[in-house]
Image (cartoon, rainbow, N blue to C red):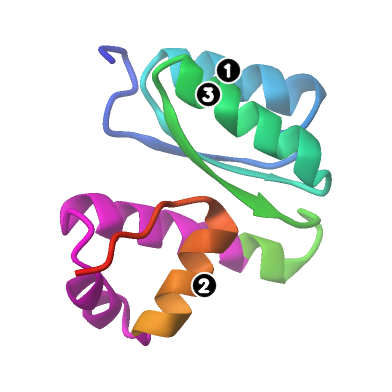
């Protein structure tokens, strides 16, 4: 997808409704890779599907933006997504680069909606 924001990453809080949701759609159309956070999982999952249908890419982090843990999980989710793309799904290499075990990596990938391939 060609756009003004190709190769850029945007973290959007409150992405399940209102301005956050509209921002996610607009940024996806421009090629940004998205890390979306919100408290409502169902709405966030639907938005991720919509972003992908628009040709974009994104991961979801369920949580409250007022909590520090949500911010840390959002950054971690983007690091995993980036490593997954860079190392083309080579799980051992991704785990090594992120400094975590493979089982932890698989769990975290399931949490953010990335498909794991065994290698």
Q: Residue at image x 55%, y 55%?
A: 112
Residue furthest to the front: 118
Q: Residue at image x 52%, y 72%?
A: 107
Q: Position of residue 91 (x, y in %)?
A: 25, 70
Q: Residues within 10 Å of mark 2 (few under 14, many from 20)?
A: few
| Pointer 2 residue | 107
Q: CA distance from mark 2 to mark 3?
A: 23 Å
Q: Position of residue 73 (x, y in %)?
A: 59, 65
Q: Is residue 74 magenta?
A: yes
Q: Bounds of the magenta span?
A: 72-101
Q: Nearer the viewer, residue 102 or 11?
A: 102
Nearer the observer: mark 3 or 1; the answer is 3
Q: Is residue 96 magenta?
A: yes
| Pointer 3 residue | 51
The answer to whether 28 appears left or right of 67 in the picture is: left
Determine which of the numbered discs, if any, sits on residue 87 in the image: none
Q: Earlier in the sequence, mark 2 or mark 3?
A: 3
Q: Nearer the viewer, residue 99 or 90?
A: 90
Nearer the observer: mark 2 or 3; the answer is 2
Pointers 3 and 1 in contact (CB under 8 A)?
yes
Q: Residue at image x 71%, y 28%?
A: 20
Q: Measured along the vertical axis of the image, is residue 34 above or below residue 117?
A: above
Q: Residue at image x 71%, y 69%?
A: 68
Nearer the observer: mark 2 or 1; the answer is 2
The answer to whether 49 appears left or right of 20 in the picture is: left
Q: Position of residue 25 (x, y in %)?
A: 58, 17
- Quarter of the C terminus within the rendering: bottom left
Q: Measured along the vertical axis of the image, is residue 44 above or below residue 118?
A: above
Main SS of residues in magenta: helix
Helix, strand or loop for disc 3:
helix
Q: Residues within 10 Å of mark 3 (few under 14, many from 20)?
A: many
| Pointer 1 residue | 25
């Amino acid at each position: 997808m060609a756009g003004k924001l190709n190769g850029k990453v945007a973290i959007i809080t409150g992405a399940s409704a209102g301005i956050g949701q509209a921002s996610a759609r607009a940024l996806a159309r421009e090629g940004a890779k998205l890390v979306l956070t919100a408290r409502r999982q169902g709405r966030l999952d639907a938005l991720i599907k919509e972003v992908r249908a628009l040709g974009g890419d994104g991961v979801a982090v369920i949580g409250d933006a007022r909590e520090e843990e949500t911010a840390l999980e959002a950054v971690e989710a983007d690091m995993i997504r980036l490593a997954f793309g860079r190392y083309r799904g080579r799980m051992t290499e991704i785990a090594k680069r992120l400094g975590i075990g493979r089982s932890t990596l698989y769990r975290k990938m399931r949490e953010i909606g990335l498909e794991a391939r065994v290698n």
